[in-house]
Amino acid sequence: MVTRLHTQVVSALMKKELRGLVEERPTAAWRETLALLCTYAPKAQWAELTEALAEQLATAGDTLAATLCFITAGAVEKAAAIWVRNPNPNLCDVDVAGELQP
């Protein structure tokens, strides 16, 4: 399985098909997917791809990760919409190691 995921990533990078990579990677691997976008996404596609990742995370119910990706994509209004729907002041804490904690 790991080899297949690595092959999938390398193939997408070589073919410059990052949209497919965003759509096919598991949402649990969002950090790695975001890192791949940070490293390899063309500037012209950056916001679109990162926002697509955020949409997938939001659909999967991972609002913390979705919020971060929306902000990274420059879609602050979509991040704000999540905050309005979830007005919990403890929605997101960052521990000493910098990990997001629900």
Image: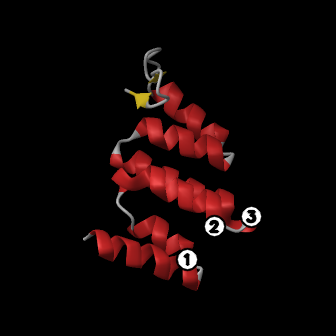
User: Which amino acid, mark 2?
Assistant: Tyr
Q: Position of residue 21 (x, y in %)?
A: 47, 70
Callout 1: helix, strand or loop? helix
The residue that appears at 65% across and 49% down in the rendered structure is 73
Question: Do the residues bearing badges 1 and 2 touch, measured as CB atoms within 8 Å?
Answer: yes
Looking at the picture, how far across and down is residue 25, in whole percent?
39, 64
Quadrant where the N terminus sits is bottom left
Q: Quadrant of the C terminus?
A: top left
For marks 1 and 2, give the CA distance.
7 Å
Is 8 left or right of 41, judged from the image as shown? left
Q: Which mark is residue 40?
A: 2
Where is 35 relative to 74, above or below?
below
Tell me which label, 3 or 1, sits earlier in the chain. Answer: 1
Q: Can residue 80 be seen here? A: yes
Which mark is drawn over residue 13?
Answer: 1
Q: How many neighbours does mark 2 have within 10 angstroms: few (below 14), some (14-19), or many (20 or more)? A: few
* Residue shown at the point (53%, 71%) measured from the top left: 19
Q: Cα distance, mark 3 to mark 2?
A: 9 Å
- Is residue 48 visible in the rendered image? The answer is no
Where is mark 3, residue-wise?
43
Between marks 3 and 2 in the image, the one whose residue lies nearer the viewer: 2
Left or right: 70 with respect to 1?
Answer: right
N-terminal of the two: label 1 or label 2?
1
**Residue 17: x %, y % from top left:** 55, 78
Q: Residue furthest bottom?
A: 15
Q: Give the distance between the C-alpha atoms of the residues marked 3 and 1, in whole angstroms.
A: 15 Å
Residue type at mark 1 is Leu
Which quarter of the picture shows residue 41? bottom right
